[in-house]
Image: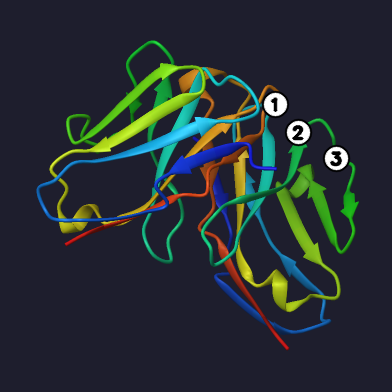
Amino acid sequence: GAVVSQHPSWVICKSGTSVKIECRSLDFQATTMFWYRQFPKQSLMLMATSNEGSKATYEQGVEKDKFLINHASLTLSTLTVTSAHPEDSSFYICSQRSPQETQYFGPGTRLLVL
Amino acid sequence: AQKVTQAQTEISVVEKEDVTLDCVYETRDTTYYLFWYKQPPSGELVFLIRRNSFDEQNEISGRYSWNFQKSTSSFNFTITASQVVDSAVYFCALGNPYTGANSKLTFGKGITLSVRP
């Protein structure tokens, strides 16, 4: 069964609005979750590492004020795309690392900014 | 620095053919993990296998088999008697033994496999 859930699976929004994506751990507590972005026909790009109870660690080139991450509990991390623009349209996927060192991925969220 | 190379970008086979997906990695870590994930058109990444660097045994799971060769830094994936449902993008990934923010996965660019009936 699913280990990680994501909500929503699809989002269509107007330019300038903010969008929140939730990532939930279903099987075990996750002190660390990961957020990726994937453009069509490309590989996954790590955006940031979400740490429970502390600030997220962002990859180089990812704007922390643009992509707000909150990891308030051991089972929930959220990614908020603030003031979304068409170039933010992408497939956003979260993952978590199990105690056995395997990363399990959520089903992803497709964001379309008009 | 870690790097994963999947030189094949697209492979097309006819159903029931065998197909091998190549993966070559680079790392300075002595302990590491190798993964294969399948991404069907729905988008979700499905975990297929994890291999530890100290375990070079090959593995077979049904029609899937994996060949880990440390000497050539390769972790190749073979699908025997391919089926249309195997059509997907397959990613090879390299993980390190660190925890927290340092426990990143490095992905290859993916191989698009199309299995024709």
Residue B28 x/y as whole percent: 60, 30
User: In the rendered image, which residue does mark 1 sit on?
Assistant: B31
What residue sits 15% from the left and 53% below the top?
A85
Q: On screen, A26 above or below A30? A: below
* Mark 1–mark 3 distance (CA, rounded to whole Å): 12 Å
Marks 3 and 2 on same chain: yes
Report which quarter residue A42 is drawn in. bottom left
Q: Are marks 3 and 2 in contact (CB under 8 Å)?
A: no
- C-beta proximity under 8 Å, tags 1 and 3: no
The amino acid on which the numbered mark 1 sits, given as a three-letter code, is Thr
Q: Secondary structure at mark 1?
A: loop
Q: Secondary structure at mark 3?
A: loop
What is the chain identity of the residue bearing mark 2? B
The residue tagged 2 is B53
Residue drawn at x 61%, y 68% is: B88
Q: Residue at x 49, y 35 (%)?
A: B1
Q: Nearer the viewer, residue B12 or A28?
A: A28
Establish if B103 lies above or below A114.
above
